[in-house]
Image: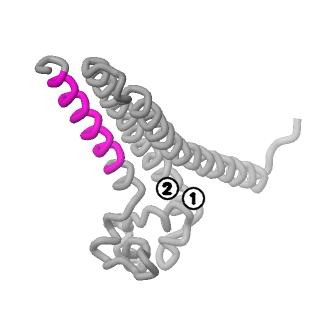
Amino acid sequence: MQELKPEDIEKMRRDDLRAEYAAVVSYHTALVVARFTIAGLLTGGSAILAAAALSPDRSSAVKAICGAFAAWLTICAWILELRSRALYRNIALRGIQIEHEQWGLTGKQWYAGFFSRQYNIEPPADCAGEATPSKPGPDVPTAFRQPLPAKLAGWVTHSMGFDLLYVGELILWSLAAIYYGYRAVCP
């Protein structure tokens, strides 16, 4: 059996690191897709449930039960969203670690990596002596072809949109359950 040379070992280490980074990117992508899939399924399911359960020929008791069930489903979906959010951030931190510690994207290149650019995490205090660029501000989305003010742009995120979606559906279905529950008990 042939003994490995140091350059062969280094090449294998680089290949392993490249494979790990590719897996991190792939898993991160899958988690992001899962977030949108869960939200889409919940929204579509809510529309179907609303059309079927809240029709005029249904009793108030059935409408109240459907409202409570839909509120429960919304809470479940929101929990899945929050867990996915935590997982993809942890995965992203590993990507950032590879970019900085293994690939040497430090100093002026601090935000050059895929995850470093996307998450804009500032360098740790022990890197303070290096010339790192200042932290980039949030992406500036536009509305009606006009850039949003910087303070508002920081709030325009997928996570904020998902939170508003889940809170909105939870309020809607909870109110429906309360309203129709009251009507069932006090006709």
Q: Residues within 10 Å of mark 2 (few under 14, many from 20)?
A: some
Find numbered disc 2 in the image and state the secondary structure of the residue it sits on.
Answer: helix
Residue 124 image position (x, y, % from top left): 35, 64
**Rendering quarter of residue 173:** top left
Instruction: Indicate the amino acid at tag 1.
Output: Gln
State the image coordinates of residue 132 (x, y, percent, origin top left): 42, 78
Tag of residue 102: 1
**Does residue 180 lie above or below 40 as drawn?**
above
Question: Where residue 168 appears, x then y in whole percent?
Answer: 29, 45
Task: From the viewer's side, name the closer residue of 94 and 125.
Answer: 94
Q: CA distance from mark 2 to mark 1?
A: 7 Å
Q: Identify the mark nearer the N-term, 2 or 1.
A: 2
Q: Which mark is residue 22?
A: none
Give the magenta-colored segment's residue range.
164-183
x and y percent of residue 42 in the render? 45, 37
Which residue is outermost to the left? 186
Examine the residues drawn in magenta and state their main secondary structure: helix
* Colouring used for the render: one colour
At 14% from the left and 21% from the top, the residue drawn is 187
Query: Are discs 2 and 1 less than 8 Å apart at CB?
Result: yes
For disc 2, the marked residue is 97
Q: Residue at x 68, y 48 (%)?
A: 19
**Tag 2: residue type?**
Gln
In this rendering, position of residue 125 left or right of residue 131:
left
Rate crowding at label 1 as few (under 14), some (14 to 19) or many (20 or more) other CA atoms within 10 Å: few
Queried whether the magenta region covers residue 36, the answer comes back as: no
